[in-house]
Amino acid sequence: MIRSLLIANRGEIACRIIRTARSMGIRTVAVYSDADAKALHVRQADEAVHIGASPARESYLVGDKIIAAARATGAEAIHPGYGFLSENADFAQAVIDAGLIWVGPHPDSIRAMGLKDAAKARMIAAGVSVTPGYLGEDQSPDRLRAEVDAIGYPVLIKAVAGGGGKGMRRVDSAADFADALLSCQREAASSFGDDRVLIEKYILSPRHIEVQVFGDIQGNVVHLFERDCSLQRRHQKVIEEAPAPGMDEATRESICAAAVRAAKAVDYVGAGTIEFIADASEGLRADRIWFMEMNTRLQVEHPVTEEITGQDLVEWQLRVASGEPLPKRQDELAIDGWAMEARLYAEDPAKGFLPSTGTLEIFREHLDVRLETGVYEGAEITGFYDPMIAKIVVHEQTREGACEALARACASTDIYPVKTNAPFLWRALDDPDFRAGKIDTGFIATKGDALLPPAEPTEDMIKQAAAAVLVQEYYGEATILSFWDKDLLASRQNDPWRGALGFRLNAPDNLVVALNLEGKPHVTTLPRDWRYKQVVGEPVAAGVAVNDDGLSFLAAVSRTSGIATGTAADGAILSPMPGRIIAVAVAGGDAVAKGQNLVTLEAMKMEHSLTAPFDGTVAELNATEGGQVTEGALLVRIEKAAE
C-alpha cells in the first residue's frame, strides 16, 4: 500500500483525497500557489510545498515543480485529482519515469481517450455507438462548413482536446458558424494548447448520462452504475444525480455494458467515466444513447456514485494504484436509494452569473448533509481558479426525498458577502418539471428567468431583514428566529428572546423600521400577527446578513437622510472582476449598436463578453488584448448617439 501521497491539485478535491488518505494511514503532501497559502487543503495536509505564483500556468500546471515537490518530501505517489494535469499523458509519464506511482490510468489510455476524434474511432471499432458527426483531419473552415451543411443544423463544435464545457459551441444556423468556430478554436487553444475541433449533430432533447467505470492491473473492469448530469448551464454541470431518472433495467444494462466495453478497449486501469448523450424525446432507450467521450480521471460528481453504492472511490483509486485488485466484483455492487449533488458557485445569478470574489465573512451550512469544500469561513475567493465554493450532496431512499433534502440544504446555506448561485439552485430543485424528472440539457435555458432570484429584496425579505436587524440593534446580537407566533410565544415566558419578540408583536400601530438594504433605503411595517418563517441573522460589520432561500443580503438601520447612488447608464464599461483581456472587438471612434460585443474578459476559467449598453460611439478605449485588469477598471466608454 502507498505510504505517502502528494496531491497535485487544490480546493475541495484535494481536501477530499486527504480525508480518505488519512483514514487509510497514508501521509499526505499538498502543493500550493501564492493565492492558496492559507487554503484549507494546505491546512489539512501533513506537509505542504509552495510551487509558484497564483496563475495556474505558473504553479499547478507546471509538472516539473510538482514532481520536484514529491521528491523533496519523500512522497511515493502523485494523485492528480481532476482538472489541471489530471488528463495530461505527458505528465503521467513523467511521474512514472521519476520512479513515482501515478494514481490514474496508464498514459497510453489517457492518450487513446484524450483526443475526442481518435476516441470515437476506437469506440466504433469496439462496437460502441457514437453520435453522428465529423472527426476528420482537415480543419479548414471551408471543409468544416461543408461537413456541417451535410450533417444539418443544429450542431456542436467541440475542441478535440476539450473538457469541462470549454471549447464548445452550439450553432443553429449557417450565419453563426464562422464566429462560433473562431471563438471555439480560440478558447480551445487557450485552455488546451490545441485548436482542433470536431463536429457533432446536436440532439434537440438531450440527456447527459455517464457511467462510472473502474479497472485494475489484473484486467478486471466493473461499472458502478450511471449518473444523470443533464442540468447544465453553458455546458457546465450544475446538479447531478444517481441513478438517472426514467432509466429502466434493460436500458441500464445496455449502457453500462457499453461503458465496460469502452474501458476494456483501452486496457483501462483506475477510475474513469464514459459519457453518453441520449435522445430523450421518447424517454431513455438503449438504441438512442450514443458515446460522447471518456474522462480518464475521477469526476467532480463522483460523490453521488459513492452515496448509492456505499463505496469510497478515492480508496479504490489508491488500492488499485498500489497493485491491489478491485475491492468488489460486479455482482457485489448494487444501487441503494437516490443521491443528488449541487455545485455551489461564487457567482451572481442576478448579474448574468458573473463570478463573485471576496472574503467569506459568513459560510455556514445548517443541515446535516455531505459538504465537499476547499474553503472555510474567513477564506478568500479569488479570480484565479474555478469559482466553486462547495458541493452539497444528499442521499435519500427516493428521488422525491433527495430533491427535497437538497433544496432545503441549498436554501439554508449562509454565505456573505460573496454572491452565490444558491437561490438559483433552490429554484431549480423546487421546479415542478425537475421534481417530475422532466429534464434535459436545455432545462435551465428553457426555464430562463423563472429560475433567477429577485434582483431586489421582496417585501417578505424586507420584513425578515427588519426582524433580524432589530434583534441586533436592541439586544446586541442575532439569532435564529423561528417561533414568532403569539400562541407559542405565550408558552415561552422565561425565554430570553421574549422581550424582543413581544416588543414587535405588541407595538402600537405596528412597528415601523427604516432599513438600508444593500445601499437602498426602504421602510417597512411589521404586522402584529404576522407569522414569521425561519430567519437566520448573522451579524457583520455593516449590519446583519439575512438568508432567504439561499439568497443572502445585507440589512442595516438607515442612519442617514439620503444615500449616494451610481448608474451604469453613462456608458462607462467597467471590468466586473479581475481578469485578462483576451479580445478587443472595437477601436476608438467606432460606432457601436446596443448589445454589440466590445471586449472579452477571461476570469475564473471562463470568457465574459462585455457589450454596449446603447447605440453610440467608442469615446474612450483602455482595454488592450492580453492585458490584466482589476475589478472596476474603466475598459470602454460609450458616448450615446444623438436622438
Image (spheres, rainbow, N blue to C red):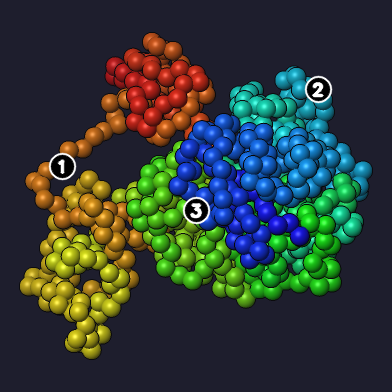
Q: Could you say whether the residue bearing mark 1 is in a helix, strand or loop?
A: loop
Q: Nearer the viewer, mark 3 or mark 1?
A: 3
Q: Earlier in the sequence, mark 2 or mark 1?
A: 2
Q: Earlier in the sequence, mark 3 or mark 1?
A: 3
Q: Amino acid at mark 1?
A: Ile
Q: Amino acid at mark 3?
A: Arg
Q: Residue at point 41% right, 46% down?
A: 380
Q: Residue at point 45% right, 17% down?
A: 624
Residue with the mark numbered 1: 563
Residue 551 horizontal/vertical position (percent): 37, 56
Q: Amino acid at mark 2?
A: Asp
Residue with the mark numbered 3: 43
Quarter-of-image position of residue 57: top right
Distance between mark 2 and mark 1 Cα atoms: 61 Å
Tag 2 and tag 1, C-beta contact below 8 Å: no
Q: Residue at point 8% right, 70% down?
A: 509
Residue with the mark numbered 2: 138
Q: Could you say whether the residue bearing mark 2 is in a helix, strand or loop?
A: loop
Q: Earlier in the sequence, mark 3 or mark 2?
A: 3
Residue 367 horizontal/vertical position (percent): 45, 70
